[in-house]
Image: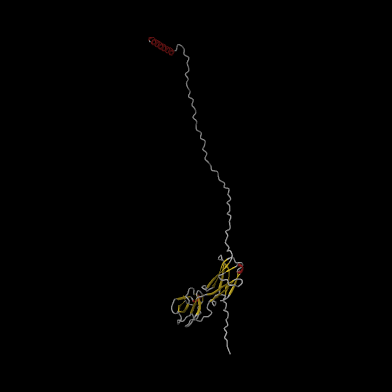
C-alpha cells in the first residue's frame, strides 16, 4: 500500500486594516521595520510579559539597542534582526524585526495582458489590474495608487493579501506615463512602484489668450488754471506843456520917446564913419 501525503495550501487570511498588536504573542514575536504597534502583551523568553514601561531591547549577539514605549512601539529605522528585552532573565530573542518587502508587482491591461513597464494604446488600458506579493501580509494591507502624467492621482484601491489583485477603472486615459505604487498602510517601508506608458500625443497645456481689458478714458474735469493777466497800468503821459512864447509886441512909440532918439543918433554916427573911411581909400 502506498500512502501519498499531499500538502494543501490554504489562502492567507486577508488583512483589511493594519494590526494594532501581534496576533501571536509567543517569543520571538515578528514585527516589521517602520511598523508601529502595541507590544506590551508579548511574552518574554525568560518569564512574564514586556509590560507598559519603557523597555530597551538589545541585539542578540551584540549590536545596537532600541528603547520603545511598548504601548506604541515604533520600529521605523530599526535594523532587522533578533532582540531581547533588558528586563528579561535571559538573552534569548523576544523580538524578531523583519525588513518588509513587496517581492512582485505586476500590471495588466483590459485584456489581462501583462504591460508592466511597457507601452499600450488608450483603448487597451481603460481598466488596469494590479497584482502584488509581499512578506508582511500577516500585519498589513497594501494601498494602491495610480498617478497620471501630470502628477494627479487618477485611481486608488487596496490589496488585502499577498498574491491578491485589484482592478481600477481608468476611463479614457490620456497619453503619457502612469506610475502605479503599492505601499503598506502602516508598514510604510514595504513599497514598490511600476510604470506603464499610454501611447499617443501627450496633452500640452495651451495658454489661453486673455484679452486685456482696454482702459476707458475717464473724463477728468480739469479746473482751468487762472493765468495772471497783467493789469493795464495807466502810465501817466506827460502832457506837453505849452510854454507860452512871449512875442515881443511892437509898442507904438511916439516920436518924442527918449529911446528912439538915441538909437537914431547912433545909426547916423555909424554911417558917417563908414563914409569917411571909404573916401580915404
From this view, report whether residue 1 is shown above or below residue 247.
below
Quarter of the rendering occupied by the C terminus:
top left
Residue, far bottom:
1
- Nearest the viewer among 79 and 18 is 79
Q: Residue furthest left?
A: 280
Residue 73 placement, left or right of 124: left
The percent coordinates of residue 44 (x first, y second) are: 48, 81
Q: Left or right? Give the position of 224 relative to 55.
A: right
- Residue 97 percent coordinates (x, y): 49, 77
Residue closer to the observer: 228 or 276 = 276
Q: Can you tell which quarter of the image residue 280 is in?
A: top left
Q: How many marks?
A: 0
Task: Give coordinates of residue 82: x percent, y percent.
Answer: 47, 79
Location of the N terminus (image quadrant) = bottom right
Q: Quadrant of residue 174?
A: bottom right
274 sits to left or right of 199: left
Colour convention: secondary structure
Residue 138: x and y in percent read 54, 78
Amino acid at each position: 500500500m502506498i500512502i501519498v501525503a499531499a500538502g494543501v495550501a490554504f489562502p492567507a487570511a486577508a488583512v483589511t486594516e493594519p494590526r494594532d498588536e501581534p496576533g501571536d504573542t509567543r517569543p520571538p514575536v515578528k514585527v516589521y521595520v517602520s511598523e508601529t504597534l502595541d507590544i506590551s502583551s508579548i511574552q518574554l523568553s525568560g518569564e512574564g510579559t514586556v509590560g507598559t514601561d519603557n523597555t530597551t531591547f538589545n541585539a542578540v549577539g551584540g549590536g545596537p539597542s532600541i528603547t520603545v514605549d511598548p504601548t506604541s512601539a515604533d520600529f521605523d529605522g530599526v535594523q532587522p534582526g533578533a532582540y531581547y528585552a533588558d528586563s528579561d532573565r535571559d538573552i534569548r530573542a523576544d523580538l524578531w524585526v523583519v525588513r518588509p518587502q513587496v517581492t512582485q508587482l505586476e500590471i495588466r491591461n483590459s485584456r489581462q495582458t501583462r504591460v508592466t513597464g511597457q507601452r499600450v494604446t488608450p483603448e487597451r488600458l481603460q481598466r488596469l489590474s494590479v497584482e502584488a506579493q509581499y512578506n508582511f501580509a500577516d500585519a498589513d494591507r497594501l494601498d494602491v495608487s495610480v498617478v497620471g502624467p501630470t502628477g494627479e492621482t487618477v485611481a486608488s484601491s487596496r490589496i488585502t493579501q499577498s498574491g491578491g489583485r485589484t482592478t481600477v477603472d481608468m476611463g479614457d486615459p490620456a497619453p503619457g506615463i502612469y506610475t502605479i505604487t503599492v505601499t503598506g498602510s502602516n508598514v510604510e517601508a514595504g513599497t514598490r512602484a511600476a510604470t506603464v506608458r499610454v501611447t499617443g500625443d501627450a496633452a500640452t497645456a495651451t495658454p489661453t489668450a486673455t484679452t486685456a481689458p482696454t482702459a476707458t478714458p475717464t473724463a477728468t474735469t480739469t479746473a482751468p488754471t487762472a493765468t495772471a493777466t497783467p493789469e493795464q497800468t495807466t502810465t501817466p503821459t506827460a502832457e506837453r506843456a505849452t510854454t507860452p512864447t512871449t512875442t515881443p509886441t511892437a509898442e507904438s512909440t511916439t516920436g518924442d520917446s527918449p529911446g528912439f532918439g538915441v538909437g537914431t543918433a547912433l545909426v547916423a554916427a555909424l554911417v558917417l564913419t563908414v563914409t569917411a573911411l571909404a573916401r580915404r581909400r
